Image: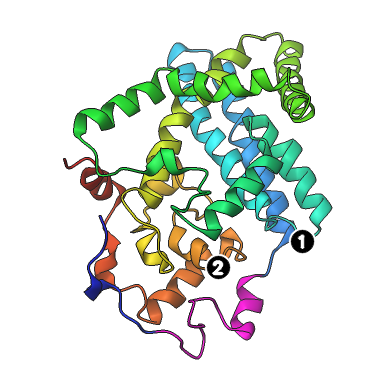
Amino acid sequence: MLPPNELLPDTLPTDRLTAAGRPVPAVREELRRISDARSVLTVLGAYLQSFGVIALAVWIGQPWAYAVAFVLMGRAHCLYNILGHEAAHRLLFNDKRVNDFVGKWLLAYPSFQAIDLYRRAHMGHHRDEFGPNEPDLDLYNGYPITRDSFWRKMRRDALFVSGWKNLKPLLKAVGKSSSRRVALEILGVQAVILALFTLAGRPWLYPLLWLAPWMTVWRVLNRLRAIAEHGGMTRSADRRLTTHVIRQTWWARFWMVPYHTGWHLAHHVDIGIPWRNLPAFHRELVGAGWIPTGLEYPNYRALWRALRSR
């Protein structure tokens, strides 16, 4: 899965990028700018695409509408998690307290993410991808794999097995003094969501259109995105050997890599650039010749085929 040496040209530094690929101060100032007003609209949009989807399904009241909502709610958890990731990097709002409050209570906790624990582990991921402290190694290590193995993973994700595996530690954490507070906070937020559905006269919406999509559709989307980011790569100081480059399409961005998270190599080169500016930073890396055309997969399907080629 590793690119050949001819696709790893040594073109840095330039007048706009340092030897490590990060922007020089004048360029960095623009690329690291955060718009609080636009972030407010982004968070509200995520809520519209989750609770709004559920409300629309209820209004239509047909089985097919609930089926569509079930799938779209898996995508909604993707929205919450990616924005939670942005908040974990403290790139969602300029004010740290606002960033952490919104990231924790309005984004991470509704989607069962312990953001403070995630932040610490995720920084280990960025410090040394595939290193000894890599928190997500089990998710994308060992690729390429056989087709049978690939589809076994997909079935486990789609049929609640992976979802229960991820939910169980949260429930067990309630009985541990070291993690009880965070577990109760997350479960408290879930109780509020259940209460809202109950007040609307439809408590069954919580297990059907909130919890179940998180345990199934979201697990599939999360794995597909994660292996597309790092599957089959290796530990290296050159981020082009740790992270794939995939051409972004509106279909992929809608379902799996919202908020420009698909420009993942750019994110790993400079983790201080907010999501809105990742396409512009990617263009800087391409313009510098550091990301040549041949390094980019034409789409996610091509990469997934390569990841299950054995």
The answer to which quarter of the image holds residue 272 is bottom right
The answer to which quarter of the image holds residue 9 is bottom left
* Disc 1 to disc 2, C-alpha distance: 17 Å
- Residue extending farthest left: 310
- Amino acid on which the number 2 mark rests in the picture: Asp
**Residue 94 tag number:** 1
Residue ID at (44%, 48%)? 253
Residue ID at (40%, 51%)? 229
| Label 2 secondary element | loop
Q: Is residue 22 left or right of residue 221?
A: right
Whole-percent x, y for residue 298 in the image: 26, 57
Q: Is residue 210 visible?
A: no
Q: Is residue 196 left or right of residue 134?
A: right
Name the one closer to the observer, 19 or 49.
Answer: 19
**Residue picked out by circle 2:** 270
Per the picture, the main secondary structure of the magenta-coloured stretch is loop
Name the one closer to the observer, 125 or 188.
Answer: 125
Whole-percent x, y for residue 130 in the image: 43, 52
Q: Is residue 307 visible?
A: yes
- Amino acid on which the number 1 mark rests in the picture: Asn
Q: Which residues are magenta?
A: 12-32
Label total for image: 2
Q: Is residue 42 magenta?
A: no
Q: Is residue 20 magenta?
A: yes
Q: Is residue 268 above or below residue 231?
A: below
Name the one closer to the observer, 289 or 60.
Answer: 289
Rendered-image quadrant of the N terminus: bottom left
Residue ID at (56%, 41%)? 79
